[in-house]
C-alpha cells in the first residue's frame, strides 16, 4: 500500500477501541525494550477520549478499508512544560506539537509514523504555523530515529514532574 492511500483525519469516539489496541501494543513494545516511557498506565482511554473531545486526536487510516494504522494528538495551543526548557528552542513563535504517537503493530517499519509527521507539518503550514516541537523519552530509539530522519534538532530537556524528556524542534518556515 502506498502512503497516498492513507487518510489523515480527526479521530472520533468510534475510533477509540482501535486506537487503544494500537496504544497497548506500543506500550508492550516499549516494555519489551526496557523503556520506562508509557509504563505507568499512560496513555489511558481517558487521555485519548479527552484528545478526541478537544479535537487533538488525529489518525492515519487505510483509504480502502478505513482501518486505523496510526494515532497521535496534534496540539496547537502550546505545552506549559515547554516554557521551562533546559536548553533553547530554535524559534519563539507559535508551534504545533505531537503527543502520544503510536503505529499499529502490523504497519511498523513502513514509514507510517513519518507520514503522520508529514501530514502534521502540512496541517501546521495551512494554519500559518512554522514550527513543530516534539518531546520523547531518552530511550525511545524509534522516535529518536524518526526525529533525526525528519530533520528535527535537539534543543534540550523538558520535565513532566520528575520525568525528563528530550525536546526537539523543526523549523517549517522562517518566522
Image (tube, rainbow, N blue to C red):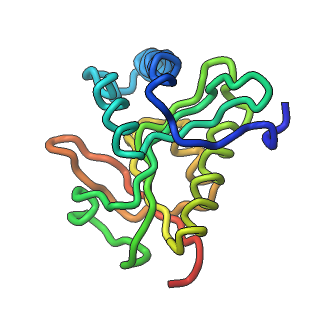
Spot the residue most to the right. Answer: 2
Q: Which residue is drawn at 39% across and 50% down?
A: 135
Where residue 158 sits, quadrant-wise, is bottom left
The tally of labels here is 0
Q: In this view, does 65 lie to the left or right of 86?
A: right
Q: Which residue is drawn at 22% across and 50% down?
A: 159
Q: Which residue is drawn at 27% across and 20% down?
A: 41
Residue 38 image offset from top left, x and y in percent: 34, 27
Query: Is the residue 95 above or below the residue 142 in the image?
Result: below
Q: Residue at x 53, y 42 (%)?
A: 10
**Looking at the figure, which quarter contains the N terminus?**
top right
Residue 6 image offset from top left, x and y in percent: 73, 37
Front in this rendered view, residue 92 or 21: 21
Front in this rendered view, residue 134 or 163: 134
Where residue 68 sits, quadrant-wise, is top right
Q: In this view, does 169 lie to the left or right of 116?
A: left
Query: Is the residue 129 above or below the residue 64 in the image?
Result: below
Residue 36 image offset from top left, x and y in percent: 32, 27
Residue 97 image offset from top left, x and y in percent: 43, 55
Spot the residue most to the bottom. Answer: 175
Front in this rendered view, residue 155 or 69: 69
Amino acid at each position: 500500500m502506498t502512503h497516498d492511500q492513507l487518510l489523515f483525519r480527526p479521530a472520533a469516539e468510534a475510533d477509540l477501541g482501535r486506537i487503544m489496541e494500537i496504544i497497548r501494543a506500543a506500550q508492550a513494545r516499549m516494555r519489551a525494550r526496557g523503556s520506562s516511557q508509557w509504563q505507568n498506565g499512560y496513555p489511558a482511554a481517558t487521555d485519548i477520549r479527552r484528545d478526541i473531545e478537544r479535537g487533538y486526536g488525529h489518525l492515519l487510516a487505510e483509504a480502502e478499508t478505513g482501518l486505523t494504522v496510526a494515532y497521535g494528538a496534534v496540539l496547537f495551543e502550546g505545552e506549559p512544560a515547554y516554557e521551562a526548557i533546559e536548553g533553547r528552542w530554535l524559534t519563539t513563535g507559535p508551534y504545533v506539537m505531537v503527543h502520544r504517537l503510536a503505529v499499529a503493530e502490523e504497519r511498523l517499519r513502513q514509514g507510517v509514523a513519518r507520514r503522520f509527521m508529514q501530514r502534521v507539518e502540512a496541517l501546521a503550514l495551512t494554519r500559518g504555523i512554522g514550527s513543530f516541537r516534539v518531546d520523547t523519552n531518552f530511550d525511545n530509539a524509534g522516535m529518536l530515529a524518526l526525529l533525526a530522519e525528519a530533520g528535527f534538532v535537539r534543543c534540550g530537556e523538558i520535565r513532566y514532574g520528575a520525568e525528563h524528556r528530550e525536546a526537539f524542534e523543526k523549523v517549517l518556515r522562517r518566522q
